[in-house]
Amino acid sequence: QVQLVESGGGSVQAGGSLRLSCVASGSTSRSACMGWFRQAPGKEREGVAGSCAGGESTYYADSVKGRFTVSQDNAKNTLYLHMNSLKPEDTGMYYCARGPAMPLIATMMTGSYDYWGQGTQVTVSS
């Protein structure tokens, strides 16, 4: 069993930055993939960034490329999402997820994951 706990959300103005963290506990494996997703009110949950092989391979949604960076600290079992140049459309609940090894493009799909955190809210004002 794996537990995931996100933190770091908050309210910022457009152009600002935030760093989200996701601490994993329980059974962990470096071969697993992890991902960040977000969900705005009334919208489906969408993939933001994926990370596999302990952070050696990453994938980003087009909407965040060049602004967001996903990284892992394997010693701390922690996944990060560094978010820069935030826009109002980045507003939503952000979730981390953990699943088995998978093709990088699959890290953008909710069905690829077995475990989810409870989410952390990000609000970007214009």
Image (cartoon, helix red, strand yellow):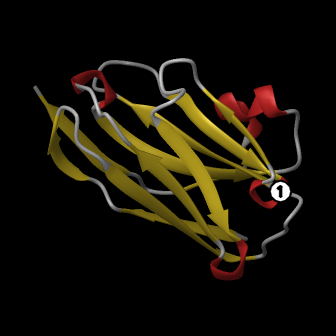
Q: Position of residue 19 (x, y in %)?
A: 39, 56
Q: Residue at x 58, y 24 (%)?
A: 61
The amino acid type found where label 1 is placed reads Ala
Quadrant of the image for the C terminus? top left
Q: Nearer the viewer, residue 107 or 118?
A: 107
Q: Helix or strand or loop: what does disc 1 sit on?
A: loop
Quadrant of the image for the N terminus? bottom right
- Left or right, 77 with reference to 93: right
Q: Nearer the viewer, residue 19 or 123?
A: 19
Q: Position of residue 23 (x, y in %)?
A: 55, 71
Q: Residue at x 85, y 55 (%)?
A: 53
- Left or right, 6 with reference to 50: left
- Left or right, 44 with reference to 123: right
Q: Position of residue 60 (x, y in %)?
A: 62, 30
Q: Residue at x 45, y 21 (%)?
A: 44
Tell me: residue 108, above or below residue 73: above
Q: Residue at x 36, y 41 (%)?
A: 84
Which residue is under mark 1? 32
